[in-house]
Image: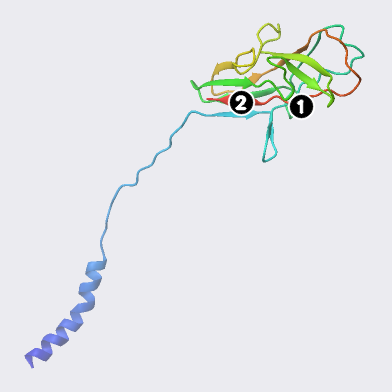
Amino acid sequence: MNRAQFLISSLVLLPLSSSLEAAGTVQGQLGIQLVIGAGCTVNNGSNNGSANTFGSIAFGTYPSLNSIIEAQSVGSSAGSSFGVTCNTGTNYSVALDSGLHATGNQRNMSAGATDVIAYNLYKEAARTTLWGNGSNGGTALAGTGTGANQELVVYGRVPPQTTPATGTYTDTVQVTITW
C-alpha cells in the first residue's frame, strides 16, 4: 500500500513540478547598430531601370559655325542642372568621358555621316578648364560632400569651324561619379 500511495502522490505532484519549471525569466542583450557609410546620390537626374540620365546640353539651331556657340547643361527634370549630395566630408569626383564620336582628345557631335562638329565641355562658366576624365585632355571635377545638394553644371562650347552639311548632330558623354 505504501507503494500505491507514493505513486498516487507522485502523479498529483507531477503537474505542479512541470509548471514550476516552465515559469521563469531569461534576459539577454540585443545589439543595435547603424553604419553611415560614405555615399552620394544624384539629384535631378532620372533612371529608367538600365541607364541614368543626368540631363543634356542643347546648343540650338544655327545656319553656320562662324562664331563661338555656348550652352550649359539642364537636368532631366527640367530647370536646373543635376547635382550630387554626398555625406559630409566624403570626397567625390565627377568624370566625363570623350563621348561616342571623339577623335583623340577632341569631342565631336555626329549626324551619322562623316561630318562632325567639334565641341568642348568645361567645369566653369568662364570655360577655361576642360572637364574630362584625366585621359582625354581634361580632368575630373573633385569635391567634398556637405550633406546638401551641390549643383553640377557642365558648360559647353562649340568653337568656330567649317560648317558641315545640314542635320542634327548629337553625342553622348558618359558621366562617372566616384566616391
What scheme was used to colour the molecule? rainbow
- For residue 21, the mark is none
At 90% from the left and 11% from the top, the residue drawn is 64
Residue sitting at x 72%, y 19%: 102
The residue under label 1 is which amino acid type?
Answer: Ala
Q: Secondary structure at mark 1?
A: loop
Along the line of sight, the residue nearer the viewer: 98 or 74:
98
Name the residue carrying label 1. Answer: 78
> Which residue type carries mark 2?
Thr
Residue 90 at what x, y percent from top left?
Answer: 50, 22
The relative height of residue 144 versus residue 19 in the rendered view (above or below) is above
Dot 1: few (<14), some (14–19), or many (≥20) neighbours within 10 Å?
Answer: few
In the displayed image of the protein, which residue is found farthest to the left? 2
Residue drawn 76% across and 18% down? 108
- Identify the element where label 2 is drawn: strand
Furthest residue toward front: 114
Instruction: Give the quadrant of residue 33.
Output: top left
The quadrant where residue 177 appears: top right
Sequence-earlier tag: 1 or 2 = 1
Residue 100 percent location from the top left of the image: 72, 25
The disc at residue 176 is 2
x 28%, y 52%: residue: 27
Distance between the alpha carbons at the discs numbered 1 and 2: 21 Å
Identify the residue at the far bottom of this view.
1
Rendered location of residue 14, percent (x, y): 20, 78
Q: Is residue 156 left or right of residue 164?
A: left
